[in-house]
Image (tube, grey):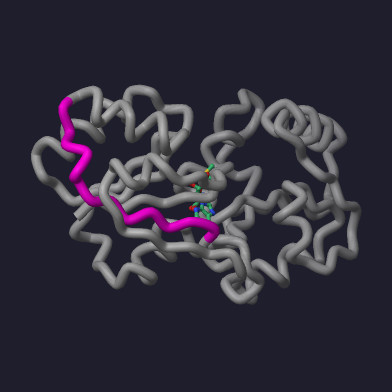
Amino acid sequence: MIYIVGIGPGSRDYVTEKAFDTVETSDFVLGSKRSLEIFEINGERVELTVNLKNELYEFLKNYKNSDSKKKVSILSTGDPCFSGLLKTIFSFDFIEQDDFEVVPGISSIQMAAAKAKISWEDYTILTLHGKEENLKKLLDFVKNDEKVIFLPNNLKNDLNYLVENRISTEKEITVLENLSYDNERIITDKISNLLGNNYSYLLVCIIN
Ligand SMILES: C[S@@+](CC[C@H](N)C(=O)[O-])C[C@H]1O[C@@H](n2cnc3c(N)ncnc32)[C@H](O)[C@@H]1O
């Protein structure tokens, strides 16, 4: 069986018992370096690179062709069902519904809502990751003064797009960076000031 395992925002503190149990009893564990480091892995460790989609495709195709009974865990940051590996794996032509199970994890969206102390049912949730078309949606939400939580694609480019489309540089945004890690940083500031900072790629943004 294949398990797509949500590992939460990054710190071990937010990994579920179910995730630990599934991963630590797997014959193969596939994931990014930062995901693999969380677990004590007893099976074979397969580190995925930026070429992850092709690597997963090859691994899973071989696995299915070999009619394997081995247990495989694929580590997905946050929750696999939000902008995660569920969609990637479903995009493979040979994968069927019964081939895998999903172990949910705490999404970076949930973690951000907890840190900012907001109820996320009041917000529209959007990911800009590889989704150019969502940038226009974000712009429309901001113009309509709607509350939004979004995962930026490239924060500075995304903010510049808003400004180029007549959103005031005085508009305030909360940026939550490296959630659950020691270098976690949470800033609420005007777009003009946010544009002056450098950021890692682990970012969630909230617009109230
Ligand atoms: C491909 S998406 C995966 C989202 C994930 N499935 C989830 O539920 O959080 C990766 C993006 O999630 C966000 N993210 C993941 N972990 C994060 C963290 N610890 N702190 C802030 N943002 C994080 C960042 O925007 C990152 O670029």
* Camera sees residue 104: no
Q: Farthest residue in the left direction?
A: 144
Q: Is residue 104 left or right of residue 58?
A: left
* Quarter-of-image position of residue 151: top left
Q: Is residue 102 left or right of residue 205?
A: right
User: Looking at this view, is 50 or 79 the one in front?
Assistant: 50
Percent position of residue 76, x then y: 62, 50
Give the residue displayed 55% in from the left and 68% down from the top: 180
Give the residue displayed 45% in from the left and 34% down from the top: 153
User: Looking at this view, is 169 or 77 the one in front?
Assistant: 169
- From the viewer's perspective, is residue 100 above or below residue 144? below
Quadrant containing the C terminus in the rendered view: bottom left
Give the residue displayed 26% in from the left and 68% down from the top: 118
Per the image, is 9 magenta? no
Percent position of residue 38, x then y: 74, 65
The tally of labels here is: 0
Per the image, is 167 magenta? yes
- From the viewer's perspective, is residue 93 above or below residue 21? above
Which residues fall within the magenta stretch?
Answer: 166-178
Percent position of residue 173, x then y: 28, 51
Give the residue displayed 83% in from the left and 50% down from the top: 69
User: Looking at this view, is 111 or 54 the one in front?
Assistant: 111
* Camera sees residue 179: yes
- From the viewer's perspective, is residue 173 above or below residue 95? below
Percent position of residue 167, x then y: 17, 33
